[in-house]
Amino acid sequence: MNIFEFMELPADHRKHPFQLVKHRDEVPASKIAFPVYAQVKRDGVFAAVVVRPDEVAIFGRTGKRFTNTEKLCEEFRAFPLGIYLGEMQTMAIAHLEALSGVVNPNRTEELDWHQQQIKDHLYIDFFDMLTFQAFREGYTCVKFVDRFNALKRRIQEKLVGYNDILPIVPIYTEEGVRDYAQQHIDKGREGAVFKLNEDYEAGHKGYRQTKIVRGVSYDLLCIGTEEGSGKYANKVANLIFQWKGGKTVKAMLGRGWSHEDAADFFLHPEKAVGHIFAVKALQESSKGVLRLPKAGELRHDKESPDV
């Protein structure tokens, strides 16, 4: 059951359940406007908490229902009816890849001890909300600041555990935008999101919501694997990704992946090929080359790559 079916709509009600976020450097200068409302970008997994009269469920960006979120759902039963958007994280020590694996909608394996700790310590930092009507229509003329204030009125006093609401900070210059993002990057956070006080449109990826994150990160489609040598014999040394202009990018498995994963991808390439991964790099050169790319988490919450 996807989020549309949970809302008693056809499963294919529309392609994109939610509004998307664009890298700020990719937004045309003509679309840059102020003020923007800044929120820190947590290094977690997008989560939409749907509170119905009879049930609470949590879904990812593509509308697939997360697994292992029963405890969180119970914590949100006191929320008024609506859809609450946030970033799911864990207080347990874990890489994003491990967190993503625990709540993966397609997960069938039992949790090990560490994964159980991740599950038991899940929480969400909320940043926006939608009414049922706005979600069904995929649009609302209610501006972001009004939605944010409604979010606080509805749930601030009902939050338990580590669940919280991310504050917003108005910023009036591009220099202020860059400084705000860098301050959070320097503190070890992923970066920041900047929102215009605009209406909400599901599937829109442009000027309304932009982000600046540490390094660069693209969600890319894996189209092949490459075996290594030496200690990487019979293991995948690189995943091969579709890139701009018909080019490809080779990326080693990054943080969170193990030698066992590299061996598993070698034996079962279908677990990687055809799937979308977050590919992270130090920077993109002026010639469009990614410097020191690494394959990050499997993006089971994405249906289409960035390029």
Image (cartoon, rainbow, N blue to C red):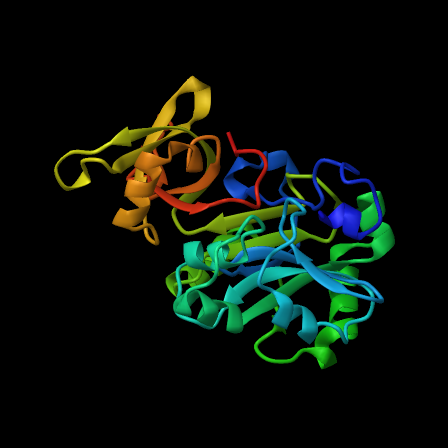
Looking at the picture, tell me which residue is in the foreground, 150 or 55.
55
* Residue 59 drawn above or below residue 54: above
| Residue 46, picture quadrant | bottom right
Q: Is residue 191 left or right of residue 252?
A: right
Where residue 190 appears, x then y in whole percent?
45, 57
Where residue 43 appears, x then y in whole percent?
48, 59
Q: Residue 168: tell me if it is visible.
A: no
Looking at the picture, tell me which residue is in the foreground, 39 or 262.
262
Residue at the (65%, 53%) spot, across then down: 65
Judged from this view, the residue extending furthest toward the left is 230
Residue at the (60%, 67%) spot, across then down: 125
Labels in figure, total: 0
Looking at the picture, tell me which residue is in the foreground, 141 or 226.
226
* Residue 102 drawn above or below residue 238: below
| Residue 154, picture quadrant | bottom right
Where residue 56 appears, x then y in whole percent?
74, 65
Q: Is residue 272 left or right of residue 64?
A: left
